[in-house]
Image (cartoon, rainbow, N blue to C red):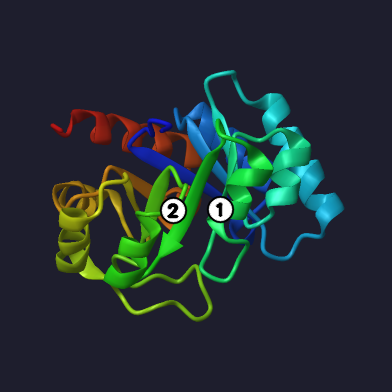
Amino acid sequence: MNALPRLYAIADASCGDPVWLAASLIAGGARLIQLRDKNAGARELLHTVDRVIALAPSDVRVIVNDRVDIARIAGAAGAHVGQKDLPPAAVRSILGPDAIVGFSTHNMQQAVEADKLPVDYIAVGPIFATSTKDNPDPVVGLDGLQEISKVVYKPIVAIGGIRLENATEVLKAGAHTIAVIRDLLNSADVQARTRQWVEVLASIPN
């Protein structure tokens, strides 16, 4: 099982150049980065992943959203897949035992099923209302997150509408790690906002 930091920063191409965003997140102290570009072709995405891996320090782990083939070719640390993507068992067989494999869930039933799969973490969300997806799943909420955290054993990555102001509540509800998009990428200074997140999360007791 791969241990995860508390901050999981997502460089989403819908918010700007993913390479620049990833570089800013890394400079701010993020050490787990997901590259997400729903509209890029394979060649473009591979180029993006290659560039980010090349600029990232050795202690930064780069995860590719959806495209397991790109993650393998580029030598990324792992991949994150959703309910309609390649099954986690297939992802594990492609990327190997040491890769980080993450899986999205949106309710109790999906989370319980995911707990039986060969994944390193279970993403649960959206915790709050989010604008990063066109057709978001129903909000899980803090109560839903807490209920899920009581019955699954794998680390939970909370995602969806989480801001620094409510991060403490999310961790208290059972999340091990918080995935963040808008609150980082929409900031006037992505690097400074990332540093703020890292410092605040580090100050919250386990």
Q: Is residue 156 left or right of residue 62?
A: left
Q: Nearer the viewer, residue 40 or 106?
A: 106
Q: Which mark is residue 89?
A: 1
Q: Is residue 194 visible?
A: yes
- Identified at 57% across, 61% down, the residue is 87
Task: Give the left or right position of residue 156, taking residue 105 as reference.
Answer: left
Going by the picture, which residue comes out furthest to the top? Answer: 58
Crowding at mark 2 (Cα within 10 Å: few <14, some 14-19, many 20+): some
Vertical placement of residue 77 versus 178, above or below:
above
Q: Specify the label residue 158 is tagged with.
A: none
Q: Secondary structure at mark 2?
A: loop
Q: Nearer the viewer, residue 117 or 60?
A: 117
The foreground one among 175 and 197 is 175
Q: Which amino acid type is marked by label 1?
A: Ala
Q: Which mark is residue 117?
A: 2
Residue 182, x across and y down, in percent = 45, 57
